[in-house]
Image (spheres, rainbow, N blue to C red):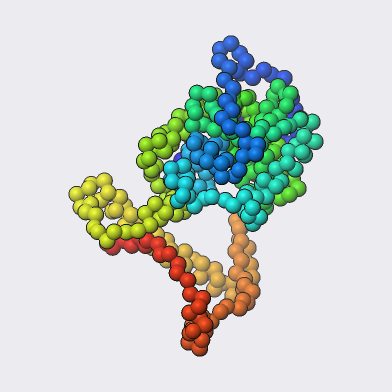
Amino acid sequence: MNLPISIGNAVTSTEHIVPNAVQSACDTPSIPKPKTALRLLRTKGLSHEEWLQARRSGLGSSDAATALGLNPYQSRLALWIEKTRPEQSFNDIDPDDDTHPTYWGTVLEPIVATHYSKRTGNKVRRVNAILQHPEHPFMLANLDREVVGQIDVQILECKTAGAYGAKAWKEGVPEYVLIQVMHQLAVTGKQAVDVAVLIAGQDLQIHRVHRDEELIAKLIELEAQFWWHVENNIPPPADGSDSAAQALQTLFQQDNGQILDLTFDADMNAVFEELVKVRAHLDEYKAKEGQLKQRIQQTMEHHSHAQFLHGSVSWKKTADVQVLDSKRLSQEHPDLVAQYFTTRTGSRRFTVLA
């Protein structure tokens, strides 16, 4: 899903932020000044579960891109489950799990904020509250930091990215982060956000995002559409992503053994026919891919890499690993193996018969 308006003018990517001498558009008589945010809940001393419960009452800034279908890591359907059926949510992150990127983002947040201040000279402070849009109560925001005493920027968003994640920042602020901070500007009525991202633990980049009234209006409209699904307990359409597939398995874990007759449903019959055609093409492409790959392998013989005009391939042997011979162990020590069996919950398998 792409927003039906341009977002390019909202961002200025820079290494050193220079104060902007031009007054913001909202200070002109022709555009009314946005209202400031309401403080919905004080977060200091709030438990993690209480904070999660409060966030489920609306859409936070980190939910915004997902609600619009622009989050590459979470589907709208998964977010809908999170808001309407939290007990079934499969995206909950353990805040103490130090193997998850979110954990290190939280740990490094104050370091990023400190070095942002050192780089720019801007003072920042925490905002210990969940903020709420004054006119659209479903729109909430938690700010990493507030920038103090600056006319040209009022919010700091701290990000971290590893070597793999750095690819998303090559062209500046990724789309889903842009939507996140534009949501913050919508809720707070502020004029600009600095996004400070620490890449690979050593490269601090600072990107300025300015308020865009047209984008904010579209953002509010599309978020309201998603929140309608939440309020009316109607799931949004699945989008074909792995996240949506997992969400469907979560929602409909059991089958009832009955047949749903869609013989006379013209729309669903068209969907089925298209699925059959797409699968036929996939089989053709899979066979073609195998043929092309094997031709390159046969040409490479024992070489580890092959270089081409517009890229390269590698064909290397992986390291040897030791694996458990479970079949032999079961045959020779069945009583011992029986002590360690556990039941793995089955999942529904989708099979096309045509």
Q: At which x and y percent is residue 125? A: 72, 32
Q: At which x and y percent is residue 200? A: 71, 50
As drawn, the residue found furthest toward the bottom would be 332
Where does the C terminus fall, quadrant-wise? bottom left
Residue 323 against residue 207 in the figure, above or below: below
Q: Residue at x 56, y 36 (%)?
A: 61
Q: At which x and y percent is residue 276? A: 31, 57
Of 152 and 273, nearer the camera is 152
Q: Is residue 13 visible?
A: no
Residue 328 against residue 61 in the figure, above or below: below
As drawn, the residue found furthest toward the left would be 264
Left or right: 15 in relation to 51: right
Q: Is residue 298 visible?
A: yes
Q: Residue at x 50, y 39 (%)?
A: 56
Of 105 and 73, nearer the camera is 105
Q: Residue at x 37, y 36 (%)?
A: 232
Q: Residue at x 72, y 19 (%)?
A: 21
Of 22 and 346, nearer the camera is 346
Q: At which x and y percent is residue 168? A: 61, 46
What is the tally of numbered marks visible in this picture? 0
Left or right: 247 in relation to 103: left
As drawn, the residue found furthest toward the top would be 29
Image quadrant of residue 32?
Answer: top right
